[in-house]
Amino acid sequence: MRYSKLPVILLSVIASEKHGSTNSVIATYILQHADEMDAMGIHAFAKACDVSMSSISRFCKEIGLMDFAELKQLIRSSDFTWDETLDPPQFRKRLGVRCQQINESLKQVANSIAQIDLQELVRDIYHYEKVAAFGLMKAETAALILQSDLLMSQKYIYTNLAYKEQMDDIETAASDTLIILFAYTGSYFKYNSKRPFLKKKDRAKIWMIAGDAGREMVQPSYVTQQIHFQSKQDDWSHPYQLAFLASMIADEYRRMTL
């Protein structure tokens, strides 16, 4: 994958916050000055962003971190650069390569998805009155596709672009709620696994939809059931495989309710 998790969350903050807001300014500064952050303390960082130190601490907690020290540690380990690719120099050949990669990724989904799991998820969507679907950045596109396609079958589900809002909704949801997580790599709470909601007895049922890259998937403790599909875990497969699955879920729902 080209992107590690932290840049995706930072981009999600920028996309979901009002332009110029405190959190948007902080996230933008990190993305633009990641190579300078290692030598920066919280006071210097707050000054560079023209915000208070308490705003920095609050920002860290809102993206699922304990404090500024953990943020710096993640910045050190995160990749903010593009992978080198050996593409053909001719434009038409590059188009052909991309089309082939995308077609192969969709075939992987079609050949590996378990019908019984997909249909069980569809039945849950039908029976639960409260349904939400979430993902980060490109994965959130799949949630939006599922939301819009299900609406055509008179089924409304909720989604939200902001990572903090997603987290708040997941942590406060009770057992009368179904949550669908689109997480391409199978990782959603990568940084802070000791989420408070894990201790709740009355918590939402969570389905996760993720690619397995040919390896055995380990189901996270916060996930009730999981749908996985074969994936190369490369850049080009990412949005198309999840979008394809979202459309298939909505289509199976439509067929079930005819």
Image (tube, grey):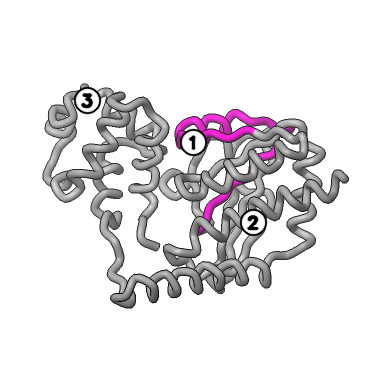
Q: Which mark is residue 53?
A: 3
User: Can you give x and y, in whole percent of width and height, for residue 227 in the image?
Assistant: 66, 58
Secondary structure under badge 2?
A: helix
In the rendered image, residue 175 lying in the magenta stretch gets the answer yes
Amino acid type indicated by mark 2? Leu
User: Can you give x and y, in whole percent of width and height, for residue 77 in the image?
Assistant: 28, 56
Question: Relative to 191, does residue 20 appear above or below in the rendering?
Answer: above
Residue 208 lies left or right of residue 84; in this view the side is: right
**CA distance separating discs 3 and 1:** 26 Å
- Judge the density around disc 3: few (<14), some (14-19), many (≥20) Cα neighbours within 10 Å: some
Amino acid type indicated by mark 3? Met
**Can residue 33 be seen at all in this image of the molecule?**
yes
Question: Relative to 112, does residue 79 appear above or below in the rendering?
Answer: above
Q: Nearer the viewer, residue 71 or 234?
A: 234
User: Can you give x and y, in whole percent of width and height, for residue 36 in the image?
Assistant: 13, 46
Which residue: 54% across, 59% down?
240
Q: Which mark is residue 245?
A: 2
Residue that label 1 marks: 161
The disc, 3 or 2, on the residue closer to the chain's N-terminal end is 3
Task: Write down the region rendered in magenta.
Answer: 158-184
Which is more foreground, mark 3 or mark 2?
Answer: 2
